[in-house]
Image (cartoon, helix red, strand yellow):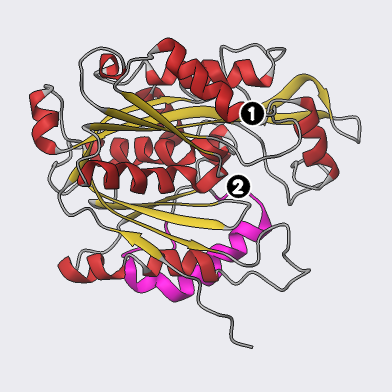
Amino acid sequence: MTMPTPSVAAYVPRTPVWLAGLAARTPVGLRPESAAAAVRAGISAISEHPFFVDRNGEPMRLAQDAVIGPEVPLAKRMKELLLSTLLQLPQAAALSANGLRTLLIICAPEPRPGLPDGIVEVLGRAVMGRFGPANLRVQCLANGHAAGMFAFGMAAKAIDEGKTDLAVVAGVDSYHDYQTLEWMDETGQLKSEVNRDGFFPGEGAGACLLARRNLISELGLEALAQLSAVSTAPERITIKRHGEDGVCVGEGLSSAFLGLGPIIGTDRRRITDTYCDLNGQRYRSEELVYTILRVQHLSDEATHYLHPADCWGDVGAASGPLFAVLAHAAASKGYSHGSRAALWASSEGGQRAVTLLDFSANPPRKAA
């Protein structure tokens, strides 16, 4: 039976939109440079929790922030992760002082057990309390893994249409709540010695500053990468419905990638580097295999992709901005495969999204 093709929403900025700043806080590094270096070296922060145990009586294994104590409650963890990351951004004062219209999009987890009610509002109030100028507009996307990709599109569109001068895409997530981890354990999502189909939870935050190139120059910043396109599509057979309503064969993710076809076909420069949210779950791996069969013509090396969950755990809604950090590090240090990177993620709710970054205008330094 032929499945209906998912609807695709692809956005290509009419005027170039550029990344002008990056920030990160992860279990393997508290800043972009250290986090990217650790991932490149394959360093893993996955370890046993000091007091959480699974249903088999074994310590739960997860990736933990190096500074925040394990006893700190989830809402406070997420606020600390988010605010400390935003303060790393160049021109962080632009969020509070210089009169430029600034759009801040906060990417947050999808609803799940253990996640405090109203966490999106809590994060929004924390940001406004820290920065809080009249010229700062905050929006929130509680769409999990793919939220960052959606936010890149929203930010580029707002800049493109002249509705904001600067845009910041910030993602934050943490699974470090016992109710959340217990639910994951009971539903087979928590990787353990007896469950190989789960994943290791992580926590972290990432942020990207975007603007037009002329404004970036006026602010004394460097244009790091061009945001070339964002493509999104829905997946009907989500991970929660897999097997009950059919089998996921990557229709949604394939459609999101194929939405990039026109821009790749225009300049005939294919994807050279791919960053994704594979985390060890068989559903996600199989989704990618089916997708590669349909979209390999868009990529130079379709089977070469980086999935940093092996190092910093699954970082959920922080994925998009953190993938941009890794892509920039690889391009600027000279160890990328080329100059066009695709960042993609799949949310549990069915959202699939791909962002295309172009580093061709900024020749890399030779890798050490």
Going by the image, does 242 lie left or right of 88?
right
Instruction: Choose top left, top right, bottom left or bottom right for residue 148.
Output: top left
Instruction: Name the residue furthest right.
Output: 56
Instruction: Name the residue furthest bottom.
Output: 1
Residue 122 seen in render: yes
Q: Where is residue 268 in the image (x, y as percent from the top left)?
A: 19, 69
Q: Earlier in the sequence, mark 2 or mark 1?
A: 1
Instruction: Give the labeled residue for mark 1.
Output: 118
Going by the image, does 180 lie left or right of 162?
right
Are the residues flagged by discs 2 and 1 in contact, CB closer than 8 Å? no
Q: In front: mark 2 or mark 1?
A: 1
**For residue 102, above or below residue 304:** above
SS category of the residue bearing label 1:
loop
SS category of the residue bearing label 2:
loop
**For residue 52, above or below residue 12:** above
Please check the rendered image and state whether residue 217 is part of the magenta-colored stretch, yes or no. no
Q: Where is residue 346 in the image (x, y as percent from the top left)?
A: 54, 53
Instruction: Give the labeled residue for mark 2.
Output: 279
Of residues 290 and 108, the one drawn nearer to the viewer in this rendering:
108
Residue type beneath disc 1: Gly
Identify the mark at residue 329; answer none if there is no mark.
none
Instruction: Name the residue furthest front.
Output: 134
Q: Where is residue 31 in the image (x, y as percent from the top left)?
A: 40, 21
The total of numbered circles placed on residues is 2
Of residues 43 and 258, the one drawn nearer to the viewer in this rendering:
258
Going by the image, does 205 lie left or right of 211?
right
Q: Label 2, label 1: how many angstroms apart (C-alpha)?
A: 27 Å
Q: Decide whether the magenta segment is chiefly helix, strand or loop.
A: helix
Of residues 124 and 177, the one drawn nearer to the viewer in this rendering:
124
Residue type beneath disc 2: Asn
